[in-house]
């Protein structure tokens, strides 16, 4: 927390910056999230020397740092090589939470994120069009998607397998 210089008795929280690391699939993950969130990669820095990560002779330049921005979320991402000499940080006990005001946008992101992913929990709220879903995407990132579509009646049909069974 930081102190507000105008009033020393008021504290403001610094925003949390999300930094996702991937096991040598950062570029593939970023392209996936561009499709899911209709976002863009605003910055990307790769290693100067290539790495033969699959022992297949293909040399790849891994991502040391990148920034992703969309309407709903922004984050930093890299391949795990950037942290090989540092202490490994586990993201297994965290989830990224995104709130949507429009059900159509919620539904679109859910449909895209669930491709080769797993929907763990679906909750319909009393308000029509309001829902929450917990999902792990194909890159093992856990998400909570919430929709607070106040007062609009929507039919829940994402086209996601097992979607209506939860």
Image (cartoon, rainbow, N blue to C red):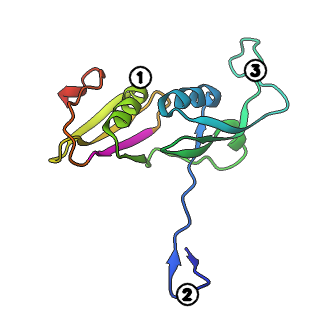
Q: Is residue 144 magenta?
A: yes
Of residue 90 and residue 142, the one placed in the foreground of this image is 142
Q: Is residue 41 magenta?
A: no
Determine which of the numbered discs, if any, sits on residue 7 in the image. 2
First in sequence, mark 1 or 2: give its number.
2
Q: Where residue 43 sits in the image (x, y, percent)?
A: 71, 40
* Eye-nearest disc, 3 or 1: 1
Q: Residue at x 52, y 69 (%)?
A: 13
Quadrant of residue 6 within the rendered picture = bottom right
First in sequence, mark 2 or 3: give its number.
2
Of residue 154 and residue 141, the one placed in the foreground of this image is 154
Q: Does residue 54 lie above or below 20 as drawn? A: above
Mark 2 burial class by Cα count in 10 Å: few <14, some 14-19, many 20+ = few
Mark 1 burial class by Cα count in 10 Å: few <14, some 14-19, many 20+ = some
Q: Residue at x 26, y 37 (%)?
A: 121
Helix, strand or loop: magenta stretch = strand
- Structural distance between the alpha carbons of marks 3 and 1: 28 Å
Quarter of the picture holding the C terminus = top left
Quadrant of residue 61 within the rendered picture = top right
Write down the region rendered in magenta.
Answer: 142-149
Say if residue 55 shows up in the picture: yes
Residue pointed to by mark 1 = 115
* Eye-nearest disc, 2 or 3: 2
Q: Where residue 128 sits in the image (x, y, percent)?
A: 18, 42
Mark 3 burial class by Cα count in 10 Å: few <14, some 14-19, many 20+ = few
Quadrant of residue 76 within the rendered picture = top right
- Structural distance between the alpha carbons of marks 2 and 3: 55 Å
Left or right relative to 60: residue 48: right
Residue pointed to by mark 3 = 52
* Eye-nearest disc, 1 or 2: 2
Q: Residue at x 29, y 21 (%)?
A: 159
């Amino acid at each position: 927390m930081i102190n507000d210089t105008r009033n020393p008795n008021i504290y403001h929280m610094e925003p949390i910056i999300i930094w996702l690391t991937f096991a040598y699939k950062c570029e593939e993950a970023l392209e996936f999230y561009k499709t899911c969130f209709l976002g863009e990669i605003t910055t990307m820095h790769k290693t100067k020397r290539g790495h033969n990560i699959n022992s297949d002779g293909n040399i790849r330049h891994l991502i040391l740092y990148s920034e992703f921005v969309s309407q709903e979320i922004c984050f930093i991402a890299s391949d795990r090589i950037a942290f090989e000499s540092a202490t490994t940080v586990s993201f297994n006990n965290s989830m990224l939470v995104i709130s949507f005001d429009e059900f159509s946008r919620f539904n679109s992101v859910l449909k895209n994120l669930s491709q080769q992913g797993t929907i763990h929990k679906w909750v319909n709220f009393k308000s029509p069009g309001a829902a929450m879903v917990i999902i792990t995407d194909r890159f093992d990132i856990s998400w909570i998607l919430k929709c607070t579509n106040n007062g609009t009646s929507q039919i829940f049909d994402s086209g996601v397998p097992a979607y209506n069974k939860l």
